[in-house]
Image: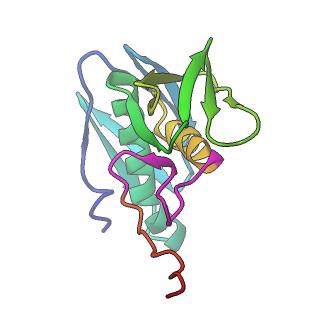
């Protein structure tokens, strides 16, 4: 039995969950998310808890059991609290700005890089070097944060670039000079 899959999901009072066959719709104060689950799993609602069960013991059902439980739990947490990823910019002259809804990055290229967020994702910038990506869908927030980091990933010699908050970049020694 999947250790993650058998854990129940508690639903906060301000969140409503609607099941229509294999389609799950979760509504909360931050927004609404829906997802179609694979036919190998079923979601049962008893009061204010959700449980994800396998329909059979096939290999596909066992593989998807824990995944679907985590996806449903992320949907419930997203519409009630939301998700956020923090990024830090390091480097002389590197900075970020908000232009409307878009994120404008100046990170050492000959031109600024403009990143447009999808619906449900917001950018916030503090001190020109700290970027906050927030939204209700954990998958989309993580993907957009990865796209921002990919504009200028941290390099190992000087550590310049965009990194996740708390990310440790392994540094390398440069070339040894002549003596």
Tell me residue 173's x, y (percent). Answer: 45, 76
* Count of numbered circles in the view: 0
Segment colored magenta: 151-167
| Prevailing secondary structure class for the magenta stretch in the rendered image | loop
Most distant residue in the front direction: 179
Residue 9 horizontal side relative to residue 22, left or right: left
Q: Nearer the viewer, residue 108 or 34?
A: 108
Q: Quadrant of residue 84?
A: top left
Tell me residue 179's x, y (percent). Answer: 49, 88
Instruction: Please tell me which residue is depicted at 54% across the width and 79% down the height of the picture.
Output: 175
Instruction: Please tell me which residue is depicted at 36% across the width and 31% down the height of the picture.
Output: 76
Q: In the picture, which quadrant includes the N terminus?
A: bottom left
Q: Nearer the viewer, residue 126 or 173?
A: 173
Q: Nearer the viewer, residue 101 or 23?
A: 101
Most distant residue in the right direction: 110
Residue 117 horizontal side relative to residue 24, left or right: right
Residue 48 horizontal side relative to residue 126, left or right: left
Instruction: Please tell me which residue is depicted at 32% across the width and 25% down the height of the picture.
Output: 81
Tell me residue 85's x, y (percent). Answer: 41, 38
Look at the image and tell me whether residue 22 can be seen.
Answer: no
Magenta span contains residue 154: yes
Instruction: Please tell me which residue is depicted at 42% across the width and 47% down the height of the picture.
Output: 164
Name above or below for residue 79 compared with residue 69.
above
Name above or below for residue 6 compared with residue 110.
below
Picture colour scheme = rainbow
Tell me residue 90's x, y (percent). Answer: 46, 44
Look at the image and tell me whether residue 39 can be seen.
Answer: yes
């Amino acid at each position: 039995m999947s250790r993650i899959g058998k854990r129940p999901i508690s639903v906060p009072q301000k969140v409503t969950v609607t099941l229509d066959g294999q389609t799950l719709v979760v509504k909360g104060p931050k927004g609404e998310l829906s997802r179609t689950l694979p036919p190998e799993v079923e979601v049962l609602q008893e009061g204010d808890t959700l449980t994800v069960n396998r329909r059979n013991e096939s290999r596909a059902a066992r593989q998807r059991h824990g995944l679907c439980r985590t996806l449903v739990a992320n949907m419930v947490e997203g519409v009630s609290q939301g998700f956020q990823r923090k990024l830090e910019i390091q480097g002389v002259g590197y900075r970020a700005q908000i232009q409307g809804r878009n994120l404008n990055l100046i990170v050492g290229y000959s031109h600024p890089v403009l990143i447009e967020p999808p619906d449900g994702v917001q950018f916030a910038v503090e001190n020109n070097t700290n970027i906050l990506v927030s939204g209700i869908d954990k998958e989309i927030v993580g993907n957009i944060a990865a796209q921002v980091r990919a504009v200028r990933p941290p390099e190992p010699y000087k550590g310049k670039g965009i990194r996740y908050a708390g990310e440790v970049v392994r540094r390398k020694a440069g070339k040894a000079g002549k003596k």
